[in-house]
Image (cartoon, grey):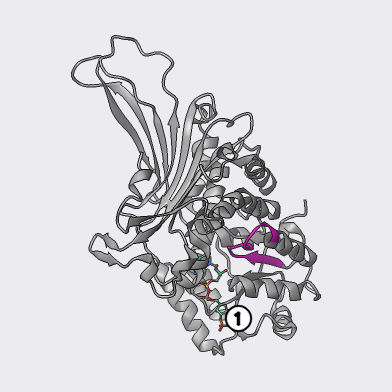
Amino acid sequence: MAPRTQIDTLVILGAAGDLTSRLLLPGLATLLASSRGRTVRLIGSAREPLTEKQWKQVVRKSFAKTGVRGEHVEQTLANTTYIQADVTTTEGLQTLLDASKGTPAFFFALPPAVTSLACAQLANMQVPKSLTLVLEKPFGTDSRSAAELNRILVKIVPEEQIHRVDHFLGRADVLNIFGVRFSNLVIEQLLSNQNVEKIDIIYDEDLALEGRAGYYDHAGALRDMIQSHLLQIMALLMMEPPASLKEFDVRNGKAMVLDATRIWKNDPVGSSKRARYTAGKIGRRTIPAYTREPGVDPSRETETLAQMTVEVANWRWAGVPVTLRSGKAMGKPRKEAVITFKPVPHLPAEFTTPATPDVLRIGFKPAGMSLDIDVNGPGDKFTLEKASLVADFGSGQLEAYGEVLAGVLEGDAMLAVRGDTAVRCWLIVEPVLRAWAAGKVSLQTYPAGSEGPRSWLS
Ligand code: NDP
């Protein structure tokens, strides 16, 4: 494999957008201020005619949100420049390539359709050999378009220089999975179909649509959360222990899990559920029905809560149902992977209460872990009670986008999604999407602020 190339010029395409100011620039600030920080040449670009002063103001405001300071933060801010360009034109892209001295990375913080057009143009242009391309989610809208985008990208640069971002992989709470799994014999030994009854990966948010109809109403919970973030978490949770945490080993390990993933019992109808929220209250907030949100077309039948059960059909995991679920406007945010173990094979009759399954929870937001086990209660010595061993992991040094950008700037694609994996994640969910499009799974409802449809509660 080619040696890693350090990026010295970061070009943000789509610099006037929401992602840039809300997540990318704050993430960059935390990286620059960290022990991994160094000064980078930062170029912002969009069609909007911003002056250098206005752009610096955008960067300053976004950096300030994090409260971090330091030499690299100040220097990057002082030297940043802005270029007005339409990246769907050869002229616009050429201007950016000409301005990209040294070893550049193009971060496409653009609407996905604009990114595709820009990449198609770049494929016919002369670009620096060391150029790195960074692409946001969604990567394509189905397996065909994702494969087509891959074909275009590898005409521009080799796969190692393509970073498909899934920012969940940069989150410290998700990266904790590496530590929990691969540095503890006691946990790792238990993780297989010999001991595990089922796995649930849940990401329920109390946020509702928050004005994002333009994107979300075309995507829905399955595409927005399960097809990308939750399958990535599942792959980390279920991959074989890698020899190293280098790009090749980690991405290969994940790919093997995803390649083995099938819809449970090959039954997309019986193994999936979808629902949409109606009006309700979350705390003191009154939430209008999803269908009444501005920009929503109710006839699209977009789901705001999705659930899908799969099987990782390999030696270690065959037979274990893995349920992935994510919802919006839920009463209680619940973000965790829950591993439920099998019952003990025999319980001595002297125990006066039945044993209940042990449960290992890996929490995302807040980051932590707990192991629920049966212990002797304080009263009768043969009465069992549940006890929880709890660990709080605290937060990481970097914001998720800080970690993502660290990978980009250090030329390490370990946290980026590999091209074949991006396609594979679409192939996994497509049988469910087809069943839903054919109306084979009814769209249920749940009041905002509830825990989802009653029939889903187990
Ligand atoms: P926005 O619509 O807020 O911003 C898009 C940016 O692209 C604007 O700066 C716009 O500026 C620029 N742009 C549009 N067309 C062109 C063009 N032809 N040439 C040059 N610049 C152009 O989008 P977001 O920031 O919300 O999202 C960007 C990407 O990030 C999307 O792929 C999205 O899916 C992804 N993403 C976003 C998240 C978020 O929370 N916002 C979270 C995760 C991923 P101008 O019109 O001035 O050219």
**Along the horizontal axis of the image, is 329 left or right of 233?**
left
Reply above or below: 213 against 410: below
Residue visible at 67% across and 54% down in the picture: 423
Relative horizontal placement of residue 312, taking residue 53 as reference (left or right): right
In-front residue for pair 374/403: 374
User: Is 404 colored magenta in this rendering?
Assistant: no
Residue located farthest toward the front when viewing the structure as drawn: 439
- The amino acid type of the residue labelled 1 equals Ser
- Is residue 422 or residue 380 the one in the foreground? 422
The residue where tag 1 is placed is 45
Quarter-of-image position of residue 154: bottom right
Secondary structure beneath dot 1 equals strand
Q: In the picture shown, does residue 8 fall above or below 56?
A: above
- Relative height, residue 212 to residue 388 (above, below): below
Question: In the rendering, at what x and y percent does residue 132 appear?
Answer: 70, 65
**Label 1 CB sits under 8 Å from any ligand 1 atom:** yes
Which residue: 40% across, 66% down? 209
Instruction: Decide if residue 10 is in sight here.
Output: no
Where residue 111 appears, as percent x and y from the top left, is 58, 73
Q: Is residue 227 left or right of residue 247?
A: left
Q: Quadrant of ligand 1?
A: bottom right
Position in image of residue 416 (x %, y %): 62, 55
Magenta extent: 132-144
> In the image shown, does 243 or 209 lie closer to the viewer?
209
Q: Is residue 141 magenta?
A: yes
